[in-house]
Amino acid sequence: MNAVEIEEAISALAERPFDGGEFPFAFLQAFGNKETTIKKLRAGASNSSDLGGVLQRNHIHIAVCAPGAVTKTLAALKASPATAKAKARFTLATDGADFEAEELDTGETVACAYADFPDHFGFFLPLAGITTVKQVRESSFDIRATSRMNRLYVELLKDNPDWGTAARRHDMNHFMVRLIFCFFAERTDIFHGIGLFTDTIARMSAKDSSDTHKVIGELFLSMNTKREDRASVGIPRWADAFPYVNGELFSGSVDTPRFSKIARAYLLHIGSLDWTKINPDIFGSMIQAVAEDEERGALGMHYTSVPNILKVLNPLFLDDLRARLAEADDNPRKLLNLRNRMAKIRVFDPACGSGNFLVIAYKAMREIEAEINRRRGEADRRTDIPLTNFRGIELRDFPAEVARLALIIAEFQCDVLYRGQKEALQDFLPLDAQNWITCGNALRLDWLSICPPTGTGVKLQADDLFSTPLDQAQIDFENQGGETYICGNPQFKGARKQSRDQKNDLSLLFHGNIDYKDCDYVVGWFIKASEYSTTCGAPFAFVATNSIAQGEQVAHLWSRLYAKNLHIFFAHRTFLWRNNASNNAGVHCVIVGVSNRASGAKFIYEADTAREVNCIGPYLIPGDEIFVEAADSPVSSDLPRMISGNMARDGGNLILSRDDTEALLSAHPQAVSLIKKLVGTKEINQGSKRYCLWITDKDVQRAKDIPEVARRIEQVKKERTASTAKTTRGYANIPHKFAQRCHRDESCIGIPKTITGNDAYLTPDVFGSDAVISDLAFVIYPMDMVAFSIISSSLHLIWSKTVAGGMRDGLRYSSQLAYHTFPIHRLTEKNKADLSRCAENILLAREANFPATIAYLYDPENLPDDLRAAHERNDEVLERIYIGRRFRNDTERLEKLFELYTKMIASPGAAAKKKKTEVSA
DNA sequence: TATCCGACATAAA
DNA sequence: TTTATGTCGGATA
């Protein structure tokens, strides 16, 4: 269950008459416990309460008590040994009139009337496995409002199916946004009289709901009509009490969907919520799921958390503003300058969603401004920061609408906070009629016309091939000569997961080069921003998948940015961007800030600690702006080539488990010549056994004579034919064989393909010709002990971890990126002999610990001394070849390797080995 | 709930 | 034709 569903269930429970016997179970059920769990608790099997209540292990101890005994009961629950023994996180006591609960870890308590306990549902969300970071609790209102709006939305679509069609979606979205505005306005006295909107509808529309839409339509019309025009338009007296709002919000059609009785009741109920508690940054992200069928399941789950957004905004420009504020101290002149500067700053989010980056940036700037005004003794001063300087582009209609509203609400809330309710109301209406959030495809729109740089002598590129003429361009910016900061969290989408349209978006941005095909969709924003930045110098920072700073994409993206003289000026290294949903695995992200500033302090953030450096490389490490490019064969001539293992693409039918193999062989001993060992990463590391059918063309007939083998071959054919990939369908012609084959009948080295973050060594191993290396490993034919030594070295691992692609937070080893690029001088015969001996010693040390698996041996806890010594020796011999001694640290290692790599690539002959064509300038 | 890596679509050469 | 890379994850412990 998601947070919104839980909120609904809890509210429904509170509305039912109180049933003491049933309450604990109903409560647990509302938090998403399964029927079977409840049944077991009911039967007492898993209920360990010693107070006649219900105690769910690791969760909660609930007791229903006699009237008036709530506080006493809660204390008893806390003191109960069973509570401690079952490690309950919460205690809860109620008599149906009062309600008290405590979170035992923190000692935080809730005490309220029973009917009000749903107000505190956020308190209990850990029961549903939803981690309550502080923020989730604070957004209880937002979750509830989302839930109610969602109900209304669904109900309205039921009665007005045409409003759900693509043609009317915009009207529907616009209507919902208008409602939200009205709910907010009537609670905050923007409409004079609390509850004016809801009350008017309740009073003026028939109870049978037949004319609800007309009443609402009249109200909307009134809010779009200036006072002086109202008589001529014929606004009825009851609608005349509403102020003129306009601001694009109420202009256009006032058409309103029809309301059923249920929808009308929902509407009135929503109006009774306390909308002053809305958090525009959070609510926006939540509510946007309402309008998207495929996202509704995750309602209330999706929002970008505030601390993460600040990871972008603070280093981008807020830190600097705050530093200037501190510097200005109480100097009125300096404070004034800062305020004037801020009034001209534009924040531009070309993937703004429901506007949370913009809202948070706006709020942060207002906070700084308020401090300036306080120090200057102008606390009541009207803000100098124009809301229209917070610009956005959003593809989806509803979030774009919500974003604008969220900013309006944020402005009002800031005015109330810093200037007072009365002053806030004074200046609020009518709203500015400008539309400063553009709905459209950010990768196709011309950013220069949406956010035109002014006062910098830049000519608008309105004739840009891909630009779309927009009236937004006509809006005057109040930021003559001001700075622009671009930020956001654009959508990530891997190269193999993009739609045709998305591919085309990238294709246009790459101006005829084809390497866009391997880029994540998010790369488009970097390219687009870099083009914008070259005309006006705007710094930009985006949240992105960590793969833009790893592996093959590094060359595609950063070669282009460096060509434009742009540099990384801050970076957050890979971190997990978690939503509040516990079942959401989270995404591995980086944040990269780019500007045209070549020198000066730069910052790398890791685990929230900042490190100051002179230069940040494209792998987000300190050092030069060097990146490697995929190479088809080694740049170092002493290394043999490494290739990918054999890929089955068989739907699992050519692959045999140990049991499969035994069964097959006992039934058909003659199959033995058709079977080989299959070796992937797991088999190398954990020594597990898998086998495969390895059938040569001359054996096909013999193989098909075995029914089980024939069945498998037939199944391979079927599954390949059904594939969406053209190449795979092609392999349906050879169903008895692996799709990709490189197997040779000689011994080889198998190299694991995935490595976890903590591994201290790569663990290649030696195999005979009876083993087929699968595509989950790499292979070198024939066996080569020098290569074995180098791959096993920590020097090579450091290099690999830096330049190879990632796998989540781990490493995905790569022949072309990590191994073929690995730089090493020409080796003497003695070097080779030394390294070979080191490799042999590693193998011998492993053998001495037989039968322990590699995974076990290389666990830092277990690494035996002899094996450790063998690796140490190997590292030492190799490093001496580079610099005559051991490196001092990894920084020195990488420095040397990149330096050598650059040299080797520049040397004649090396260019021919490069895999991909140079990017034209 | 933290860890671990399998299988294959789809790219380039 | 051949052979790579990466996966806003899921299985599994």
Image (cartoon, coloured by chain):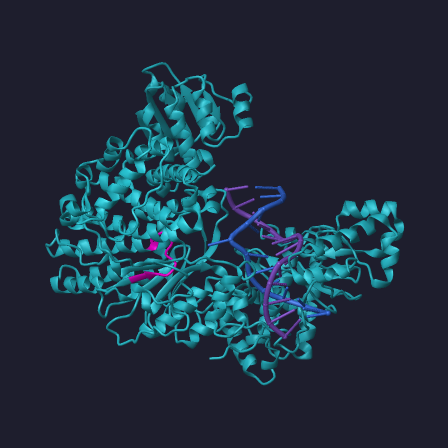
Chain colours: A cyan, B purple, C blue
Quarter of the image for residue A151 reads top left
Nearest to the observer: residue A107 or residue A725: A725
The picture places residue A106, in percent across and down from the top left corner, at 36, 34
Q: Is residue A619 left or right of residue A698?
A: left
Q: Is residue A744 left or right of residue A103?
A: right
Q: Is residue A440 above or below residue A882?
A: above
Q: Is residue A32 left or right of residue A261?
A: right
Is A352 magenta? The answer is yes
Nearest to the observer: residue A134 or residue A564: A564
Nearest to the observer: residue A220 or residue A847: A220
The picture places residue A412, in percent across and down from the top left corner, at 22, 48
Residue farthest to the left? A377
Whether residue A176 is visible, yes or no, is yes
Q: Is residue A449 left or right of residue A60?
A: left
Whether residue A184 is visible, yes or no, is no
Nearest to the observer: residue A382 or residue A61: A382
Residue at image location 68% in from the left, 75% down from the top: A832
The picture places residue A765, in percent across and down from the top left corner, at 70, 61
Q: Is residue A493 above or below residue A93?
A: below
Residue at image location 12% in from the left, 51% down from the top: A380
In the image, the segment drawn in magenta is A347-357
Residue farthest to the top? A66
Q: Is residue A434 above or below residue A598?
A: above
Residue at image location 16% in from the left, 47% down from the top: A232
The picture places residue A702, in percent across and down from the top left corner, at 88, 56
Is A537 magenta? The answer is no
